[in-house]
Image: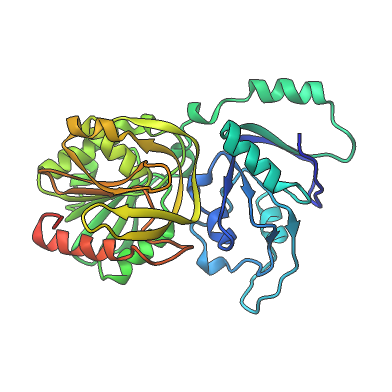
Amino acid sequence: MYLGCSTGRPCLVFGEVVFTTGMVGYPESLSDPSYKGQILVMTNPLIGNYGVNTSLLESDKVQVTGLVIHELTDISHWDSDLSLQEWLDEYNVPIVQWVDTRALTKELRNVGVMKGALGVWERNPDLESLWRKLVDAPSYDEVDYVKEVSPSRPIWESHSKPLVVVLDCGLKLGIVRELLKRGLGVVRVPCYSSLEEIWSLEPDALLLGNGPGNPEFLRSQGKIAVDMATEGIVTLGICLGHQIIALGLGAETFKMKYGHRGQNKPVKDLRTGRCYITSQNHGFAVGRESLKEADLVEWFVNPDDGTLEGAYHKYLPIATTQFHPESSPGPMDTSWIFDLFIDAIRDGKWNL
């Protein structure tokens, strides 16, 4: 048990406890739908010092279940709309500070991410009752969180051509901004859209983006992406989309011990030998040993732990990245992947 203090109202929430190594970018992280169902621990000791600019968020609200930090600092930025505490209170998301987050992170690295409870009480809680509630709470891997963050209807961002249909499983808006910046038409569709519904939009390309939870829930959507690529539709998968497409092709995924979350994660391009620093947020990975049966070629790997960070298909117009090329927040080292996507749409194939 880790103790801290909170100025929020009494509450009790449950979620998977994970950590991020990012020193900045907490508004983007907290509004990233990939964190749905998770209690986020910030390793940087000072959080909140530049408040929240609501025009730079990755979705329309706070997505984390709870936030654990060492110290909540005062606002010192002219472009802030409100404080971090005010923003979290608006969505009834608890924040606890004065926690030894470095010790907690070490424990998560040693043991792995785990189911946890975050509570705010006016007096000491009944620990035995709390433990029973925690044991009875569903595990993160058992819940289809995508249903909670995917839109209920198509959302048109731009009617330009060529048109990219985005299978929205909890998409970061930074991905949309990168597509619009390059003049593409964009329509976001519910993650569980049928093949017929997607074809009716007459897409020129397909993008499967990020999202929360276990990719095993979305095997059928991976098969839809493969069916469309078989018909010549250029396809890009990012983060969860990378995993879904791999599953659709017959590869396998696995749960990582503590995942990759932060804006300082290295990846190596196996084609060129170059290393890039990337933004990442994932707790599952695609097994490298399963790629051969799926006709996938390794594109990027993580030099820290050897996990797969990107792949492309031998014959179909499919390419994927486990990391986030749009960053937001983080370094812009890999934004060129969106330019490569533009070239692939024009040529009808990935030039890899």
Which of the 4 image quadrants contains residue 197?
top left
Q: Nearer the viewer, residue 200 or 316?
A: 316
Q: Give the percent coordinates (x, y) of residue 315.
A: 10, 43
Q: Residue at x 24, y 66 (%)?
A: 339
Residue 167 horizontal side relative to residue 213, left or right: left
Q: In the rendered image, which quarter contains the N terminus?
A: top right
Q: Nearer the viewer, residue 84 or 260?
A: 260
Residue at the bottom extreme of this rendering: 78
Q: Give the percent coordinates (x, y) of residue 34.
A: 48, 46
One can see residue 94 in this view: no
Q: Nearer the viewer, residue 148 or 325?
A: 325
Q: Residue at x 59, y 59 (%)?
A: 26
Q: Residue at x 64, y 37 (%)?
A: 107
Residue 179 horizontal side relative to residue 196, left or right: right
Q: Give the percent coordinates (x, y) of residue 338.
A: 27, 62
Q: In the rendered image, which quarter contains the C terminus?
A: bottom left
222 over 266 or under it: above or below: above
Residue 26 horizontal side relative to residue 7, left or right: left
Q: Give the percent coordinates (x, y) of residue 217.
A: 38, 30
Residue at the right extreme of this rendering: 123
Q: Nearer the viewer, residue 63 or 240?
A: 240
257 over 275 or under it: above or below: above
Color scheme of the displayed model: rainbow
Q: Residue at x 39, y 30 (%)?
A: 254
